[in-house]
Image (cartoon, rainbow, N blue to C red):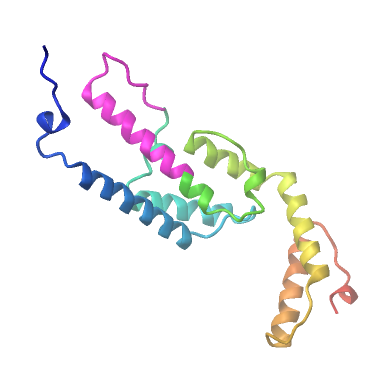
């Protein structure tokens, strides 16, 4: 009868509790970092992308968005280096996608493209942020905000008027002229 070789036998320094704790800490860091990243709203791709790339780089999880090709899947004849590369890329890809999705405003998430590749996802989001669909969606959101926003004395009137003027300016930059009498 063959002897059963355990992970402890093969890797005496391996400690499962430490690995579980490391993963839990990584997820906690990821969740905390997603709160520090600008939320993608359809208009701020450049700033959002820059922060996502920085955060992934700091966490050493940017492999999936930096590599041009996906590593080959693990097969029986794969070397240890190939296995390590694939596992590292897979982890980077999964956590990158999670961070990107966690750092989006809720009303944008349903219209985001579906893919299992973080690099593709970044490209698709860039295209989405430059599309006519985004413009129409944002115009609708801004018009809704402009028509429902009321002054409630919780802020100085100057801030309220400035906020309304800023919304009107954003709409104007998107080809929608807002009559000044509408702002009062």
Decide: is 133 above or below 48.
above
Side of 23 where 3 appears, left or right: left
Decide: is 138 above or below 160.
above
Res 144 quadrant in image: bottom right
For the point 57% across and 52% down, the residue is 45
Q: Position of residue 11 (x, y in %)?
A: 12, 33
Q: Between residues 169 and 10, which one lies in front from this camera angle?
A: 10
What is the total number of numbered labels drawn onto the structure image?
0
Q: Position of residue 92 (x, y in %)?
A: 38, 40
Which segment did they paint magenta? 70-97
Is 160 covered by the magenta stretch?
no
Q: Quadrant of the N terminus?
A: top left
For the point 81% across and 70% down, the residue is 148
Is 79 covered by the magenta stretch?
yes
Q: Position of residue 150 (x, y in %)?
A: 79, 77
Side of 88 where 176 appears, left or right: right
Res 63 quadrant in image: top left
Side of 166 where 25 appears, left or right: left
Q: Position of residue 25 (x, y in %)?
A: 31, 53
For the point 10% across and 30% down, the residue is 9
Q: Between residues 101 and 133, which one lies in front from this camera angle?
A: 101
For the point 50% across and 48% down, the residue is 100
């Amino acid at each position: 009868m063959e002897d059963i070789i355990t992970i402890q036998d093969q890797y005496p320094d391996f400690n499962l509790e430490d690995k579980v704790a490391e993963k839990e800490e990584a997820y906690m860091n990821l969740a905390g970092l997603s709160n520090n990243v600008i939320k993608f709203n359809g208009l701020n791709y450049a700033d959002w992308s820059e922060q996502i790339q920085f955060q992934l780089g700091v966490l050493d999880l940017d492999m999936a968005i930096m590599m041009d090709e996906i590593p080959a899947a693990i097969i029986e004849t794969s070397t240890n280096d190939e296995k390590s590369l694939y596992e590292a890329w897979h982890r980077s890809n999964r956590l990158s996608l999670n961070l990107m999705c966690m750092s989006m405003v809720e009303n944008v998430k349903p219209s985001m493209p579906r893919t299992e590749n973080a690099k593709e996802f970044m490209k698709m989001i860039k295209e989405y942020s430059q599309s006519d669909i985004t413009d129409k969606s944002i115009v609708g959101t801004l018009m809704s905000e402009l028509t429902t926003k009321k002054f409630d004395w919780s802020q100085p009137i100057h801030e309220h008027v400035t906020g309304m003027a800023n919304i009107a300016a954003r709409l104007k930059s998107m080809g929608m002229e807002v009559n000044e009498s509408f702002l009062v």
